[in-house]
Image: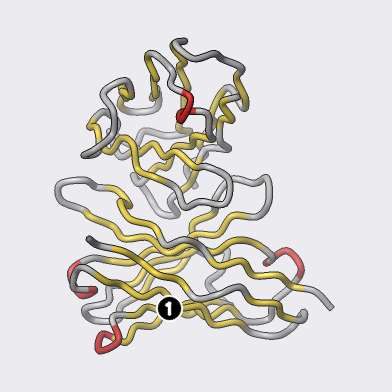
Amino acid sequence: DTQMTQSPSSVSASVGDRVTITCRASQGIDTWLAWYQQRPGRAPKLLVYTASKLQSGVPSRFSGSGSGTDFTLTISGLQPEDFATYFCLQLGSFPWTFGQGTRLE
Amino acid sequence: QAQLEQSGAEIKKPGASVKLSCKASGYSISDYAIHWMRQAPGQRPEWMGWINPDNGNAKYSQTFQDRVTLTTDRSASTVYLELNSLRSEDSAVYYCARLVIIPLGALDIWGQGTTVTISS
């Protein structure tokens, strides 16, 4: 199985800050990686697909990069609604696997 | 607007089975595969398997291979997940999600989740 190591597990930040979250895959997955935002009690929301493409309707302060084994999600200029949990999902090989999540607080 | 609507919360005893539903609206369920994940409290999500609603072909994670069955009723635009031999570790929120291979290569729409509680 492809293991996904996500860091940090939590980060304290303030409105206006820039935050970077990383995911590392235990084996190469090309750009088969997606980033999701999850609020308590809510379904995950797709932010970025194929590592760097922004999903329609997602603010441009979100950006993704990377390929192979190392990926990042950056939020530039945090807004109050961005305080949530973020996780990555690798779709490069079955079984698909998730990062452990980053809580932005 | 495409949506996935999941069935309500379930409380089951150890050893029992549970069958969850995921109803598609706003698009044809035959057009996209449906994947199932679960998330225990404080844990990362766990992928369980997927089904092609058009032909009923399903693939399962080895973790659940012996206990899970995915089925579809196209006339009802609904996919079902059945999990057998339930144990306490199966307590989690179960999600279905739609896979859009082109152009996204990602799960773009998720159901609201179904909470399953296993308790004697």
Number of marks drawn: 1
Residue B28 seen from this side: yes
In the displayed structure, B39 sits above or below B70; it is above
Looking at the rendering, which quadrant does residue A88 occupy? Answer: top left
**Looking at the image, what colour scheme do you see?**
secondary structure
Foreground pick, B31 / A95: B31
Q: Position of residue B81 (x, y in %)?
A: 48, 77
Q: Position of residue B37 (x, y in %)?
A: 49, 59
The extreme top residue here reads: A17
Q: What residue type is labelled 1?
A: Leu
Foreground pick, A85 / A94: A85
Q: Residues within 10 Å of mark 1 (few under 14, many from 20)?
A: many
Looking at the rendering, which quadrant does residue B80 occupy? Answer: bottom left
The extreme left residue here reads: B103
Secondary structure of the residue carrying tag 1 is: strand
In the displayed structure, B61 sits above or below B118; it is above
Q: In this view, does A40 lie to the left or right of A62?
A: right
Residue A24 seen from this side: no
The extreme right residue here reads: B120
Q: Mark 1 points at which residue?
A: B70
Looking at the rendering, which quadrant does residue B53 occupy? Answer: bottom left
Q: Position of residue B114 (x, y in %)?
A: 55, 67
Q: Is residue B107 left or right of residue B113?
A: left
Which residue is pictured at 55% across the width and 59% down the height?
B38
Which residue is pictured at 39% across the width and 45% down the height?
A45
Which residue is pictured at 55% across the width and 75% down the height?
B8
What subunit carries mark 1? Answer: B
Q: Position of residue A10 (x, y in %)?
A: 62, 25
Which residue is pictured at 44% across the width and 11% down the height?
A16
